[in-house]
Amino acid sequence: MPSSRLARTLIIANPASRSGKGAAAAERVQRVFETYGAATRGFDLRSTQAPGDAVRLAAESSHYDTVIALGGDGIIHEVVNGLMQLDSYARPLLGVIPVGSGNDFARTLGVKINDPEISLSQILVGSERLLDLGHVSSDLCPEGEYFMESLSFGLDAAIALDTIDRREAGSKQEGSKLFLTSSLKLAAKARKALDCEARIDEGELQKLKTVIFAVQNGPTYGGGFKICPLAMPTDGKLDVCYNVLHPRVPKLLFLLGLARFGLHTRSSAVSLATARRISLDFPTDAPPCQVDGERFVGNSFDVRIEPRALRVIVPRGWAT
């Protein structure tokens, strides 16, 4: 095992991730660090017990050089938001060991999914990159949250939130299969579009009948659906995909299926854009909203890019 520049390292692990497989993954990573002392200059392993624990642990990590988030996109989202509470000069380097259902941020980085030894080896020989983050705030959450991968409103957000509920209820499905079955379950909700006023950068105010409005820092959500195939967290902008027509339910489900491969972008029912800032107002109904798979609430939203906000370890040879 090669030596690394991880130095003082904090591992923040969600033992409940991937139906409890996170606990075993954390033990395996701990054994590697105990066996190969040259990998760090000392490490601590902290397991989360409740939502918000990882935010707190990351926000208190300024005396570490590296923080490793072990778990699904939810734990990575919390760690990112905790790290962003620190001044940039005191903010540790971030590494990810993905052990989850969707793992979309890991897909963006090219990190091996659900194989902690391999993803740890990628960290140990990887390189450091400055990555962009998105940020969303609302009338009900003015302090907002950062997101490393995905923010969406409407049907796809309702689907993402349904997958959370089903996983917590013990569903054995994972990733894109779980997303697809939730899509079929919630298809009837697509009959009702949400009134939305949207402004992208300094463009004209658009009045939309919104079924789906996705804002991406990376290309995928829902366990690999390429909703914004060209999105990358190094280009200083967010990618947007939203409906401009209101297709009937069968066509909408067909488009969601095409999104698995990024082919929905050829449809006249959707529009793509890039942006540094987006404002959204839903004047009549609060929309279903998810940020990196977590619930977010409000009627009026402000979304912006935070360029080169966080130092992240990426696999050797990662290209953007």
Image (cartoon, grey):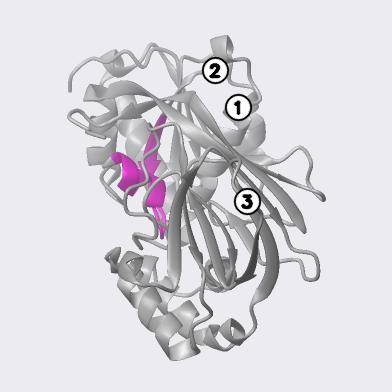
Query: Which residue is label 1 attached to?
Result: 84
Q: How crowded is mark 1: few (under 14 residues within 10 Å), some or many (20 or more)?
A: many
Q: Name the side, left or right, on which 235 lies relative to 310.
A: left
Q: Name the side, left or right, on which 116 lies relative to 179.
A: left
Q: Identify the secondary structure beneath mark 1.
A: loop
Above or below, 241 against 120 in this view is below
Residue type (three-letter) at the residue carrying disc 1: Met
253 magenta-colored:
no
User: In the image as oriented, which residue stretches furthest toward the front?
Assistant: 204
Residue type (three-letter) at the residue carrying disc 2: Arg
Q: Using the image as rendered, state which of residue 33 and residue 88 is in the foreground.
A: 88
Q: Name the side, left or right, on which 226 lies relative to 250.
A: left
State yes or no: discs 2 and 1 in contact (Cβ < 8 Å): yes
Above or below, 318 against 311 in this view is below
Q: How crowded is mark 2: few (under 14 residues within 10 Å), some or many (20 or more)?
A: many
Above or below, 118 against 123 in this view is below
Q: Using the image as rendered, state which of residue 252 and residue 19 is in the foreground.
A: 252
Q: Which mark is residue 204?
A: 3
